[in-house]
Image (cartoon, rainbow, N blue to C red):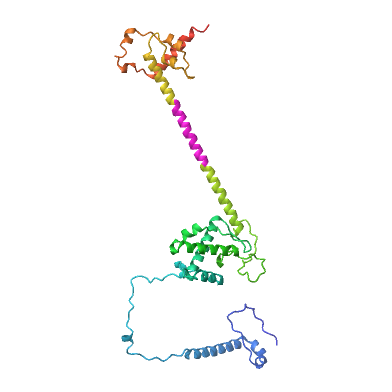
């Protein structure tokens, strides 16, 4: 008997698979495949049976209800003391957030040292000793960050940069005597120089990737380097990128210093130029005023004041020429010079310049052969 041909349809992921429980299901294979209606009816019947089974299961109680007894005196024994506040409830931060948490624990060497230190009298408590060592480690780490000393791997030694004076100044809030703090600092520095690394675990640099020692844990994760296009290029946060950024920062600071010095130099040059201009203006002003006074106070038969004092390089008129070109002044006018009004002696500077130029041209015309 030939099979009925029908159009294939995609598989339905929500359709349940038929479970074969006995061989009898294979006997009527041809009969079930001859018509699709019988198959659909059987699936519908099975679905009804499954729905009935699940509904019966859900109706049964799954969680048992515990028995309880009502206490009549509960309200009297336990009064309601809680009142609804007008503001939100606030929670306190953790110890690490409050700054009271100490990450360092004393080891055997530290316990032996503090026991020997407190041999005669209990001067330092273990809790205070832990706090001091933790603060010294954090301060030294900050000093290394400011100096730019970063150790990428565990094998390289980590120097101690924290000085005693800086430590004493930073630990004044702990109310510890100077002698005790000095002893703790010397012990911590000796231990750090012997270990060649920080005694606080989170401040120690990670071990190298190729280190096979199983006790050196917390290795850095090997990152597979993937090539990116110019458009998809990303910046990697590693030590090399950090060193490049530090170099760029240093170059920018140097360029800023050079530009500031250049600006100061240009300002000084401008100030010098302004001073020279003011000096030249004052020299020209006092030179013309001196010439006016000499012309007004000169007596016949006496050389002018400038010829007696000495002429400078800027004097371009000879004293003899000045005498020849100067008009004669009457003795009567000279005798009454002290009684003259000083306002009558003031001659405009521009007019005096023009008269001097005319007189110089007249005196030099008869000297030419």
- Residue 251 appearing in the image: yes
**Who is closer to the viewer here, 217 or 349?**
217
Q: Residue at x 63, y 71 (%)?
A: 215
Q: Is residue 270 above or below residue 32?
A: above
Q: Is residue 269 magenta?
A: yes
- The mark tally for this picture is 0
- Main secondary-structure element of the magenta-colored stretch: helix
The stretch in magenta equals: 261-280
Q: Position of residue 212 (x, y in %)?
A: 67, 69
**Who is closer to the viewer here, 137 or 73?**
137
Q: Is residue 224 above or below residue 355?
A: below
- Residue 351 appearing in the image: no
Outermost residue on the right side: it is 1
Q: Residue at x 58, y 88 (%)?
A: 41
Q: Is residue 21 left or right of residue 166?
A: right
Q: Is residue 159 above or below residue 250?
A: below
Q: Is residue 66 left or right of residue 255?
A: left
Q: Position of residue 210 (x, y in %)?
A: 67, 66
Q: Residue at x 31, y 14 (%)?
A: 338
Q: Position of residue 156 (x, y in %)?
A: 63, 61
Q: Is residue 282 magenta?
A: no
Quarter in which the N terminus is drawn: bottom right
């Amino acid at each position: 008997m030939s099979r009925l041909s029908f159009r294939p349809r995609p598989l339905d992921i929500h359709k349940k698979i038929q479970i074969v429980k006995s061989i009898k299901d294979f006997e009527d294979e041809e009969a079930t495949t001859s018509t699709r209606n019988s198959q659909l009816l059987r699936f519908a019947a099975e679905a009804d049976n499954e729905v009935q089974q699940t509904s019966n299961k859900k109706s049964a109680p799954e969680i048992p209800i515990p028995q309880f007894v009502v206490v009549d005196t509960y309200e009297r024994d336990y009064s309601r003391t809680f009142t609804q506040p007008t503001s939100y409830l606030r929670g306190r931060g953790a110890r690490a957030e409050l700054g009271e948490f100490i990450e360092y624990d004393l080891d055997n060497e530290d316990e032996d040292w503090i026991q020997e230190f407190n041999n005669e009298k209990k001067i330092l408590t273990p809790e205070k000793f832990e706090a001091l060592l933790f603060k010294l480690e954090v301060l030294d780490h900050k000093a290394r960050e400011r100096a730019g000393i970063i150790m990428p791997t565990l094998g390289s030694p980590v120097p101690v940069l924290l000085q005693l004076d800086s430590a004493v100044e930073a630990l004044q809030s702990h109310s510890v005597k100077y002698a005790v703090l000095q002893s703790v600092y010397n012990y911590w520095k000796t231990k750090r120089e012997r270990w060649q690394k920080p005694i606080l675990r989170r401040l120690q640099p990670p071990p190298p990737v190729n280190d096979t020692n199983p006790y050196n844990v917390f290795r850095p994760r090997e990152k597979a380097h993937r090539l990116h296009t110019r458009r998809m290029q990303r910046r990697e946060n590693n030590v090399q990128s950090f060193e490049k950024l530090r170099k760029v920062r240093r170059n920018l600071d140097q360029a800023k210093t050079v530009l500031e010095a250049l600006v100061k130099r240009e300002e000084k040059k401008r100030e010098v130029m302004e001073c020279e201009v003011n000096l030249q203006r004052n020299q020209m002003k006092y030179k013309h005023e001196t010439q006016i006074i000499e012309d007004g106070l000169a007596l016949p038969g006496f050389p002018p004041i400038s010829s007696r004092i000495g002429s400078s390089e800027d004097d371009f008129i000879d004293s003899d020429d000045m005498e020849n070109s100067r008009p004669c002044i009457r003795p009567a006018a000279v005798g009454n010079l002290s009684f003259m009004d000083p306002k009558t002696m003031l001659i405009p500077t521009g007019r005096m310049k023009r008269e001097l130029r005319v007189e110089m041209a007249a005196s030099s015309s008869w000297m030419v052969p």
